[in-house]
Image (cartoon, coloured by chain):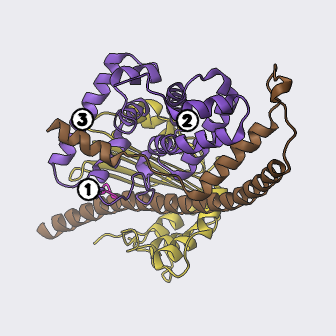
Chain colours: A yellow, B purple, C brown
Amino acid sequence: MSKYTLTLLIALLAPGLSWAATSPKLTIPSFAGLAQKASESVTITLDPAMLGMAARFLDSNDPQDAATKDVLKGLQGIYVRSYTFDRDSAYSQADIDAVRNQLSAPGWNRLVETRSRKSHADVDIYIMVDHDQAVGLAIIASEPRQFTIVNIVGAIDLDKLHKLEGQFGVPKLDIDSSKAAKPGQK
Amino acid sequence: MNDAAADPLDDELAKARSGDRAALGVLVQAHQRSVYSLALRMLGTRDLAEDLTQEVFMQLNGNLRSIDSNKHLRFWLRQVASNRAIDQLRRRARLQWTSLEEETQLFSDEEDSDPLLQRHMRALLAELSPPARAVLLLRYQEDLDPQDIARTLDMPLNTVKSHLKRSLESMREKTAGPLPVRCEDNST
Amino acid sequence: MSNDIESRMRAALRPVAPREEFSQTLLARTLIETAARPKPRGFTAARLRPMAWWLTASLAASLVLAVGVHQHLEQQRLQQSGLEARREVLKALRVTSQKLNLAYEAVKSQSTSLDDEKSGV
């Protein structure tokens, strides 16, 4: 069975990664036209101030809150835009290209590209790395009636993200921090 | 209905216009519930509703002398509250009813309250555009007829009727079907 | 029946009272605002009267009340904002995890197909 881990990919990519002046924070358009067409839209903008405020209101005694608080440490921002439509193909790829084009700038690397015939969902995951530390994460998910853009900025601790497994239904990402990733290993 | 029947608040208004603060207080207390409820159901959160209610009555202070009867005052308050709320909703893209918390109490909890209907009503309010929401509230909260609603919102009468018709249809669909499930995860 | 639905909607939309604290603040602020306004022009001598001591006292009391309530409201507002921020964070992470899951499922499914192909050879 072929497996790969995010740690492995980062290890493979790290030597070749260029940490240029590209910002890990994407410029996300307002999507005003699409928002009007959407049956449901989710717009979340959490800058450092909001994240700090949220962290103060997370209950350390609650497992979900505690794990979330841990993930938030070191983060500078979380930005989500998600639009759901009543019919297929209500949006075009061109709508998302303004964001996708930014991810071809130096510093961003496509970690995962999935095209699923079963769920008709295309998901691309990009990561920006600086000295073996993930400093930016971008997810673009296109489904027939929904598209979602997620941008997380800051020191993303993949181990902690892994520990959120089960809290939000985060899947096992096969990250085992005890194993050293070797280039070329599959 | 005798439109000429004396409205006791007309006296208070006359006094308030002359600078009688106690009379003004009476008017504020008489109308704050209606203004607050409009603001709350338009904007969806208590904080925003309180802010808007405050703004409306502050504005009233400056316009009292141009209001000549309690009936006119009611019209003025509804107009200002509705229009300010609509403007606010248009300006603030973040005021998404998709993030409306169930804890915000939009409806009264009197004995004969219908929690199931309230849930449908909440869903209906969330899906309506700001002007349509205002139309619905002016009709069923303030009991205005479509012509008065059109005048209040400066909206064509046919548009008002159209909003009402669609809202009623939507409400019928909701009450005919099963209780809407609160969907948190859009798993596809 | 349309009338039944409409009457139930009217019942559901009966006006609700604001919080008592807010009512008091609203009243206090409105009265203070009025007191601060200059007297309207043409205010005849006949209507002038010296401000009674009790009126001064009540204004002062209103001011103190308004300030105290304002501070309390500010605190409540901060708390509301904090709770809202928390909700937004949880929602953002939920959406993130859903999309990661989509990718994971696709990769897993592809892996399974490849393995099936290999064993079928």
Q: CA distance from mark 3 to mark 2?
A: 25 Å
Residue C39 colored in magenta in the image: no
Chain of residue at mark 3: B
Indicate the chain on which mark 1 is placed: B
Q: Earlier in the sequence, mark 3 or mark 2?
A: 2
Q: Are marks 1 and 3 in contact (CB under 8 Å)?
A: no
Q: Is residue A39 left or right of residue B171?
A: right
Tell me the amino acid under the disc marked 1. Leu
Q: Is residue A82 visible?
A: no
Mark 1 lies on a secondary structure that is: helix
Q: Marks 1/2: CA distance?
A: 29 Å
Q: What is the x, y in percent for residue B14?
A: 64, 28
Label disc, if present, on residue B116 of the rendered structure: 1
Asked which secondary structure carries label 2, the reply is helix
- Residue B44 marker: none
Q: Residue C94 at x, y = what percent?
A: 42, 61
Identity, as a three-letter code, of the amino acid under mark 3: Leu
Residue A60 found in image quarter? bottom right
* In this rendering, the label closer to the viewer, 3 or 2: 3
Residue wearing tag 3: B168
Magenta segment: B181-188
Q: Amino acid at mark 2?
A: Gln
List x then y, in percent, for residue B129.
39, 33
Furthest toward the front, the residue is C46
User: Mark number for residue B88?
Assistant: 2
Crowding at dot 1, Cα within 10 Å, few <14 / some 14-19 / many 20+, comes out as few
* Circle nearer the N terminus (1, 2): 2
Q: Position of residue C7 (x, y in %)?
A: 25, 42
